[in-house]
Image: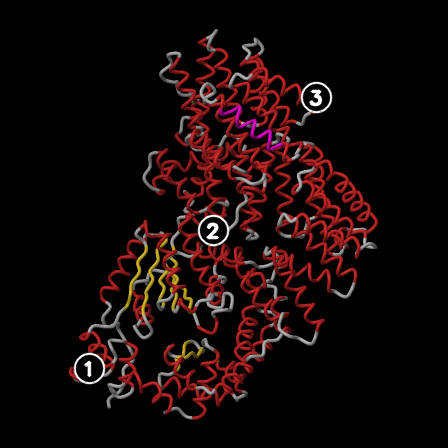
Amino acid sequence: MGPVARAGALVGRTEELSTLQALVRAQAGGAAAAVLVGEPGMGKTRLLAASADLLRNHRVFRMTGFEPERQVPLGAALPFLRRIGALGRAGRQLQALLSHADPELGSVEPARLFEAAHRALCEVADPALVIDDLQWLDGLSRALAHYLVRAALDEGVGVLMVCATRPGPESAAFASSLQDLLGDSGHYVELTLGPLAGAEGAELAQALRPGLSSASAQRISSAAAGSPFWIELAIRAGGDPGVRSTAIPALLRALGSDAVQCLAAAVIGGRPAESALLGEVLAWPEARVAAALSELVNRGVVSAEAGWFGVAHDLVREAALNQLPHEHSRRLHRQFAAVLRRRAEGDLQVLMEALEHEGAAGAVSTELASEIASSPQRRVLGQSGLHRLAAIAELPNPDGTERLAVDRLLADLAEEIGDSEFALRRLTQLSETLPRRAERASAALAAARHAVELGLVPETVALLARARRDGWDDPWTHVGADALDFARLAWLEHDAPAAQPYRTAAIDAARDLLARAGPLESLPLAARQAYVEAINAERVSYLMAGDMTGMLDVADEFVEATRGLGEQHLDARLFLSVALRLLNRWPEAESRAVEVRRAARQQVHPGMEAYAGLELALVVYHLGRVAEARQLHEEARRLCERIGSSFDAADTWLCGLREVIEASAANWRTAVESLRQQADRHQNPHYRIILRQRAALWSARFAPAETRELVVALLDSADTDARAAGCVRCAADLHVIGAEALARVGEVDSTRRLLQAWDAQWPDPNARAAFHRLRADAALAAAAEESSAPELLRQVIASATAAGTRLEELWGLIDLGSVLAGADRAAASEAWSIASRLAAELGAVSEQRLVDQRLRAIGVRRVAPIRRSAADASPVATLTRRELDVACLAVTGARNVDIAHTLFISPKTVEQHITRVLAKLGVHNRAELGSRYADDLDVAADGTEK
């Protein structure tokens, strides 16, 4: 019997390699994926290895699934995450999250980890992710792989994924989701690997044993049914045609005693391990382990790579596992669990591996469940991990104290991952069973928070009563209970007047207690949470009452109260932006929103980044940068979809924001219809108000003559919603903005009555409300054909210009032209011509279309362009501020990903800006941009800064 050659070049699979090669060529810097599907032994791993030559221009990263780790969160992905965590700026941020090295970053959760991994991968040129044994990947690793492809597709960056898997429902679902993402682009292929053809199988046999006759090679290929694995094993077994039933047992029987024991440990370990770990499990000296591993490697049973040793193939592992006595297997599992727990030091993945081994040994402990629930990375467990730990906690356990401790940890974990139903159940139980009265009160108060979040009024009332009863001597418990009663009445029962006494009691007591307690940092966490909830009740109360000055004052207090509380602090800072825009201080609001969005991105809080992005889109839209607002909203929407969150309802003014932007940017009729449909579906009256109000206003502005009945009906429905919501601020906004809409459609008497009632209720309105009142006055004067209309509209224009709200300035000009058209066509033409140029500058397509129609109606066919001074003669002057920022960085040689990092936008957005810059300046590439316009860009940038 001659020597067995190591498998070299791939034999067969020519068509599959050709398909993969075509995919790599077609990828061209975008997102692409290939899935190789085949039964065990069909050469999937061999094909992955052979594809390395196709990926020679890529930076290749790997993930491998192992069957015993299917329940270990990120078990397959962790080596990949650690590797990209060592690369670049974003990689260091990922590494900080993984290691929990910076407490300021807060807890790790899947969305943060996934987004950090995506950003780290963006900094790598031409990355490729190769996944073997996808069927064994844990759910979180599989979700990460999908996220990386989706995020790359969203942001227009390149990533190539090649996966190998056995057939199965989870693999099929993963492949289907990739096809849904990439199928239309032609950047997805799925290849099913069947047996090698007879000639190919024989060729492989002869490649493995040079000199083997063609007849013998054909016999082996046929006996192995074309499986590359069984062909190679038959060659190792001396060409035995009965290889499928005898080869592996024969291989195992030939092993020495130590090799058998070492193989058993490797099989039970499930994934490649260092020799030191195997030695610790077996309690062997290093030399003994090394000798056993050497024999296993030489016989092809175990593979070795960079000091790690793993079973050579799943089929070998399965055969060895079947021969292992049950009690021996359980003993090894116990030994692995003990060793891993000693090594864990709080590392979640290691603890979860230990849990798998304890479970296989039939001896799961609540002590280990407590360690897992206390890990700094516990949030990545998700709901499935939480419920698994809960099942362990519910096993019979004589130590009731330990069971209560685990229950408390699980309740905390449920709160952190947002499983309010689980948290409510567990905390309610704890509020009845904890031994100390103060602990029961704390649990009842925490449970009540979740009852409010879930909209459960009777449960909230009962839990708050229990909290007050058991915490009768703790003033902070009463602060928290009063704040939650305010939330219950204001948001769940829509009874704002009844809610106010609770708000007053909560905030007055909280401030008094804090003054006596000393520095905020000295408060216990529960007391600080109650203080934050009291301030939140105060700010919501100001908001509902329309007292924006008071809201701004409490917003500063809210920021200080949440300092050091991670995402909650960012939320408080973003509320400052909200308060400023409600005071008509739009540029300041933009600055605040930009700061929060940047901080959220730097700290990898994708949810808060998306929320701040939506708030910024709203502000930028009102400032008149329609295209930028559209882009900001789209980026935030894509990010929301990636992380599975929705922030449209976080602020009523964000509800329907996409339609508001689209009304100006594209088609106002489509936008209005979408707003109406959303209002009909929404359950919360607060959001129905704003949706119907916006639909009414846009209808009245763009087509008053044809939408009169629609506008009246929408506002009537919104008024019903306002009464149901019981919110003073919502009603006030509706009435003053609704008055403008009613005036535009000719409902003069109704408008006057509405404004009289509004004036009586709001004798001293804030700046934004005063502007809305001025708009309504101007619309009423125009509808009633009063002589004061032109002057009122000039005041609207001046006020909008002062606030920087250029879209309102545009509508003031459009309306001014309309009231002047009857008596002074020249003046109307001038107002509308200015409006047309302004609409073009802002990207307000619908408004420009409307004003150009009105110009044509009075005989003006073409609006003269603005004459530029000599200083503005360069085409660079046509660039928007953001285009200028991008162009200035591009001419320095910065890559898209570097520009994106500097400007806190996505690489896809950078590419879109570059495309527009090249088109506007009439150049073909960045080199030409730099050679022709570098000096002009410097001058323009200096002027912008000044």
Mark 2 element type:
helix
Q: CA distance from mark 1 to mark 3?
A: 99 Å
User: Could you tell me which quadrant the N terminus lies in?
Assistant: bottom left
- Sequence-wise first label, 2 or 1: 1
- Sequence-wise first label, 3 or 2: 2
Establish if 98 lies above or below 639: below
Residue 670, how many percent across, how many down?
Answer: 42, 32
Decide which of 278, 866 is in the foreground and name it: 278
Relative to 808, 10 lies left or right: left
Looking at the picture, which amino acid does disc 2 mark? Arg
Badge 2 crowding class, 10 Å Cα cut-off, few under 14, some 14 to 19, many 20 or more, is: many
Q: Return the residue at label 2.
A: 642
Badge 3 crowding class, 10 Å Cα cut-off, few under 14, some 14 to 19, many 20 or more, is: few
Relative to 187, 488 lies left or right: right
Q: Nearer the viewer, mark 3 or mark 2?
A: 3
Q: Return the residue at label 3.
A: 760
User: Could you tell me which quadrant the C terminus lies in?
Assistant: top right
- Sequence-wise first label, 1 or 3: 1
Disc marking residue 217? 1
Q: Nearer the viewer, mark 1 or mark 3?
A: 3
Establish if 608 lies above or below 470: above
User: Does 718 appear in magenta?
Assistant: yes
Q: Give the magenta range.
A: 710-722
Residue 235, how many percent across, how many down?
Answer: 26, 84
Looking at the picture, which amino acid does disc 1 mark? Ala
Disc marking residue 697? none
Q: Based on the displayed image, in which of its 4 quarters is residue 486 positioned? A: top right
